[in-house]
Amino acid sequence: MPAQTFARSRLDQFLASIDHGLRTTFASPQSTRPAPTSQDDEHPNLSQEQKQLSIALMRVNHVGEVCAQALYQSQALLTRSPALRSHFNHAAKEEVDHLAWTRKRIDDLGGRISHLTPLWYSGAFAIGSLAALAGDSYSLGFVVETEKQVEQHLASHLERLPETDHASRAIVHQMKLEEARHAEEAQAAGAQALPAPVKALMRLSAKLMTRTAHYI
């Protein structure tokens, strides 16, 4: 590919990434699939305390999906592998459904998303960029570790969500299944295991994010 054409292509990708970030942060996402449902969804029996807990947990999950978009966008932007770029873009597209499902569930419960959404997106984009600059195998390894931690996090939410909040539980259950699959796909694509200190730092960052987004 001629240098001028390559530079224009990278600029197009960069501008598209900025556009995607703005839409992720400020617009209402549209899902390509209907949200998972339960036959008991139509008659929830939630106390005010239970409703506030569900809102807080789904807000945390929404932030996680905002961060997922930022991570995949940065990694797709910085890889030089067309196949890997396609891999990241495909995963990001599926994650848009998660973003839309969690946002709608928060709206249905009468809650709000995090006030710090732009900050979460920016921080995740920077982290994803660092992972991508470390090389494709480590970038994929970052996906594997991220998705494993997200899967564990969603499992803990299934334990904490009110038993009668069938709609939220159905969404979280489906997300958990798909996050596990994303980890498996990244592993199969050639992921390199991350050093233990990096994994620990990721867990610490995730804990900071979840505790903050629970309230703000």
Image (tube, rainbow, N blue to C red):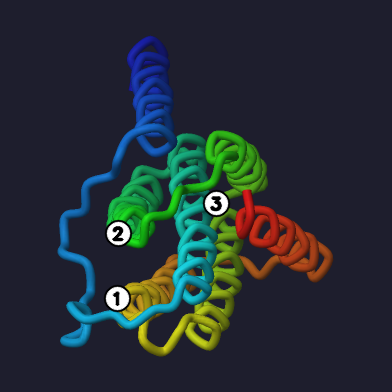
Q: Which mark is residue 167?
A: 1
Picture coordinates of residue 33, whole percent (x, y): 16, 62
Amino acid, disc 2:
Asp
* Residue 149 appears left or right of 23: right
Residue that protrudes farthest toward the front in the picture? 48
Amino acid, disc 3:
Asp
Q: Which mark is residue 108?
A: 2
Residue to which mark 3 is pinned: 136
Q: CA distance from mark 2 to mark 3?
A: 39 Å
Residue 197, located in which quarter of the rendered image?
A: bottom right
Of the two numbered discs 2 and 3 on the same chain, state the one appearing first in sequence.
Answer: 2
Q: Residues within 10 Å of mark 2 (few under 14, many from 20)?
A: few
Q: Residue at x 80, y 70 (%)?
A: 196
Residue 51, located in which quarter of the rendered image?
A: bottom left
Picture coordinates of residue 31, whole percent (x, y): 21, 53
The reply to whether discs 1 and 2 touch (Cβ–Cβ < 8 Å) is: yes
